[in-house]
Amino acid sequence: MESWELVIIGAGAAGLAAGIYGARSGLKTLIIEEKMAGGTTSDAPVVENYPGFPRIGGGELAEKMTVHCKKVGVTIHEIETVTGLDFEGERKIVKTSRAAYEAKAIIVATGSHYREIGVTGEKKFRGRGVSYCGVCDGPLFRGKRVLVIGGGNSAATTTLYLSGIAAEVIVAHRRSAFRAEEALVKDIASKKNVQVFWNTEVLEIKGAKLVNKVVLLDNKVGATKEITVDAVFVQVGEAPNSQIAKDASIQVNDKGYIKTDVFQRTSIAGVYAAGDVTNHPVKQVGTAVGQGITAALEAYSYIRQPYYRK
């Protein structure tokens, strides 16, 4: 069994930031990521609110973080899934699909996954017109008519990205106003090929082999209508990837987010959490980075200076 001082689960913004600070502090640091390094930051069409970068693609920002992390000496294992955590006794064991690792401290930075809307046809047509990532699948629908579901920042940025690819973008939002940043809302209003249906929910996604129609409900007047679309982009937020934490008896709140204090400490000594998987109320790249830094420095104190903070 390999022994590490710090094992970080997840290579999104929080995990990569934690890795940089862990390695720079002198800790032998391993990051384990079930997909490719970058996390959901990589899925963002464009990031315009990360300090120092007025405008940068999410994939580019994630790549810069990953390169930086490796440069300071962090080992990153990609395409390796963590299957369980064992905190019996004093040792902390991270079990994966490939091996098991012993750690003195652990940071859970597993992020979140895209929420589904739970309507008929959503699962059936996933990958066949139903998508949760505009950057990943938007180019497949160049010159087509697409629907975006949602009204927050992720829906707004996806709408803006798709407006430069698709012939027409329709937005269905169940409220009467966006919940996104004002700058994004103004940009959407300036796009001639974007149409917004307010107070509108999707009842069903239809198609043959691929998506071709959706049924919409105007929840203000109670009327339904069917419109033709070539793709549906679901952008209604995320849910935490906290199952391995829950299975290891790490405390979570009623929504499944890992409970942390201001030092990113969880309910188990020597185990920290950072990023979108935590109960922090703001889910942004900047806050994830800050939490990752805090978690790494606290892990350093726990490992090298146990008297520093009790």
Image (tube, helix red, strand yellow):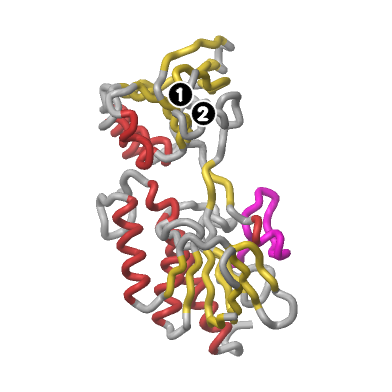
As shown in the figure, which amino acid type bears the numbered disc 1?
Leu
Q: Quadrant of residue 159?
A: top left
Q: Is residue 233 left or right of residue 298?
A: left
Q: Is residue 38 above or below residue 147?
A: below
Q: Is residue 28 above or below residue 276?
A: below
Q: Is residue 72 left or right of residue 272?
A: left
CB atoms of marks 2 and 1 within 8 Å: yes
As shown in the figure, which amino acid type bears the numbered disc 2?
Phe
Magenta stretch: includes residue 260: yes
- Quadrant placement of the N terminus: bottom right
At 25% from the left edge and 50% from the top edge, which residue is drawn? 55
On the image, the x and y values in percent for residue 239 come to 58, 46
Q: Decide if residue 262 is in sight here.
A: no
Magenta stretch: includes residue 110: no
On the image, the x and y values in percent for residue 292 come to 47, 67
Residue holding disc 2: 125
Check disc 2: other Cα within 10 Å, few if <14, some if 14-19, many if 20+: many
At 32% from the left edge and 75% from the top edge, which residue is drawn? 71
Q: Is residue 50 left or right of residue 203?
A: left
Closer to the camera in the image, 63 or 96: 96
Q: Is residue 241 left or right of residue 40?
A: right
Check disc 1: other Cα within 10 Å, few if <14, some if 14-19, many if 20+: some
On the image, the x and y values in percent for residue 126 come to 51, 33
**SS assignment at label 1:** loop
- Quadrant placement of the C terminus: bottom right
Residue range in magenta is: 245-261
**SS assignment at label 2:** loop
Closer to the camera in the image, 96 or 153: 96
Q: Is residue 43 above or below residue 125?
A: below
Residue holding disc 1: 210
Specify the label residue 183 is tagged with: none
What distance separates the C-alpha of mark 2 from that of mark 1? 7 Å
